[in-house]
Amino acid sequence: MSDIDSYREKLRPGSLPHFFCPGCGCGQIMNFFLQAADEVDLDFDNLVAVGGVGCTARIPVYLDADALHGIHGRVLPWATGIKLHKPQLDVVVFAGDGGVGAIGGNHFIQAARRNLDVTVIVVNNLNFAMTGGQVSPTTPSGLNTMTTPYGNREERFDLYELAHSAGATFFSRWNTFHYQQATDSIKKALNHEGFSVVEILSQCPTHFGRYALGSGEPTRGMEWIEEKSITISDAHELTGEEKKDKFVLGDFYSEERPVFAGSTVYVEEK
Amino acid sequence: MLGNYALVEGALAAGCDFFAGYPITPANEISERMANRLPAVGGKFLQSEDELCSIYSVTGASLCGAKAMTATASAGFNYMQEGLGYASSVEAPCVIVDVQRCRGENYATQSDVMQMKWGASGDYEVVVLAPSSVQELFDYTVEAFNIAEKYRIPVIVMSETTIALMRENLTIPEPGEIEIEERDRPEVPPEDFLPFSPNDRGVPPMPSFGEGYHTLYSLNPHDEAGNINWDPDTYENMYERVLGKIQDNIDDVSIVEEHFADDADTILVAYGSEFRPAMDATLRARDEGLSVGLLKLGTVWPVPEKELAGAAEAADTVISVEMNVGKYTREVERVCGPRAEVRSVTKNRGSIHTAGEIYSAIKEVS
Ligand SMILES: Cc1ncc(C[n+]2csc(CCOP(=O)(O)OP(=O)(O)O)c2C)c(N)n1
Ligand code: SF4
Ligand SMILES: [Mg+2]
């Protein structure tokens, strides 16, 4: 049985207080991860936690493990070097929607294609939060952000479609409302061998909440996401047009495929 | 052996066990030979999706304990600048090869010489070695790994089309005869370890990922414990140490050859393949009784100021020879200018100087 003390032990000494705004989903998602890690007995001596730059990217800074932080979008190249040189390490990447949807998009695609054996937890707060609430590739169409004052005229990425077609072997999506399901999916992802992605829709009250939803109340942000959330089986009943502004939640799929061990691997000639 | 191949052999002799590269001429033979050789000796080869992936996968592997290298040519080196800055700030040893080429083509040039040192944001010191022959592509690559390990920095091998695609004799020493440096490792258990507390060279001992040391490697200013800390003193101290560990040990990382430089009236300064015609011109001038010497810079960054100043002190004229618009001449001018007249002999036409061209420049001042 896990308890709060065993989560506390997993936090880097001296790193608190954290810098997340009150009511931010990042803190919740860090908790989901800690609970999942506890329940699957993830060994923090064997863990490398990787963050890029942004609010989400701060999560690894608070974990008492080896960690990388501070460069925007290059989380998967780091992870690739780590997993190739020391495949026995567990690597968990915490990435923002900007980090994997925009600047690091190609790395995300290539790592999925290679089936790199890492877990990517995407905190999709639907905007570039750290930089002040600009539109991101996952911001729903029509919404106002700091750089879409007349509404977002771009189409959004569906990270499931992206990851799946690129070759990821595990994908789940939840929101911060569904903490138990999100935690269970992180556990499955940690136990999965191959490129596993757990996307969690998350409220950013400070920016997305205020600019796109007109409310900085964390619960309003959560409710807004939950109102638009449907299950995978619900989604089967809807047309493409009807699904357009929905968030489809669930464990999408899990597959087995050989994991990446280098672009060419030596085979002794017989 | 082909220059690019000699470099690979040097890397393997130094213990390189991780390589990532993205195709680009004239560096392709490095990736191709690495793909062939490295997996067979237990290393890992990655053909990256771009040069950013190259440099960051190299950094990730390095922090796991690998001796890691990437190779590219000028256009790809641009992309690596951000990663070079990161590797410097978290002190991840690695080797980067830039086989310089002219804008999009494989003509000869030394025009990246400033990009080597000033391309990344933030403050950092890198060591940049400029080989002039196939043999030196081997030797300097071994040295690059040794300096990277000893000082926990990225070291750049600044190669050129001229030597990378040339075949010359190569002597590979017996394995036991090659001196190999390894990074200092922590001597205390994790609970007593401060990941950015330096040894007497200014270099922190380095654990590998997965050994229980729980080290945070952040680009942000960090204190000795590795924690992000924006305190101005922490910031200043961090940079002082990271820059100081190279500045204070400059003699140890400087490769400089002096040829007849003791009491010559005219001193040539050359690096990389330009050393070759400069040497020919020096010998020809000396045959004719002219008082000429040559300083060959094997290390171009940090600038070997002591050796440059010393040579200029005794001379009337210093001639800075390079294959670009005269970029490094500014450094030569800075150091030698107060002591002698500095002239710039440049060629920016996609080909190396002839000995005759340099000889003419010597004649002008003699
Ligand atoms: C190369 C580079 N470009 C831009 C930035 C500025 N930047 C910092 S955080 C960030 C956005 C992060 O958005 P996301 O990845 O969604 O993370 P969030 O803050 O929303 O969690 C950007 C663009 C940077 N640090 N580096
Ligand atoms: S800006 Fe948004 S995402 Fe960032 S910490 Fe604040 S609420 Fe969270
Ligand atoms: Mg975001």
Image: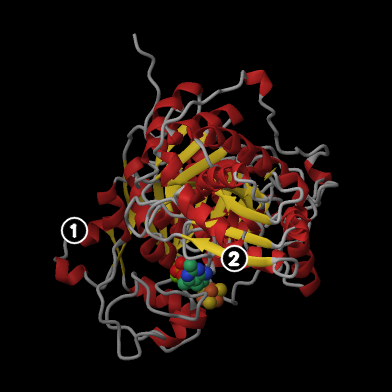
Q: How many dots with numbers?
A: 2
Of the four image quadrants, the one with ligand 3 is bottom left
Instruction: Give the quarter of the image for residue A241.
Output: bottom left
In this view of the protein, can residue A119 be seen by the observer?
no
Q: Is residue A156 above or below residue B186?
A: below
Q: Nearer the viewer, residue B148 or A50?
A: B148
Q: Amino acid at mark 1?
A: His
Q: Position of residue A206 (x, y in %)?
A: 52, 82
Secondary structure under tag 2 reads strand
Q: Which residue is mark 2?
A: B343
In this view of the protein, can residue B317 be seen by the observer?
yes
Do residues under tags 1 and 2 come within 8 Å of each other at their CB atoms? Answer: no
Q: Nearer the viewer, residue B57 or B323?
A: B323
Identified at 25% across, 81% down, the residue is A153
Q: Is residue B310 above or below residue A227?
A: above
Q: Which residue is mark 1?
A: A236
Quarter of the rendering occupied by the C terminus of chain A: top left
Q: Is residue A35 left or right of residue A111?
A: right
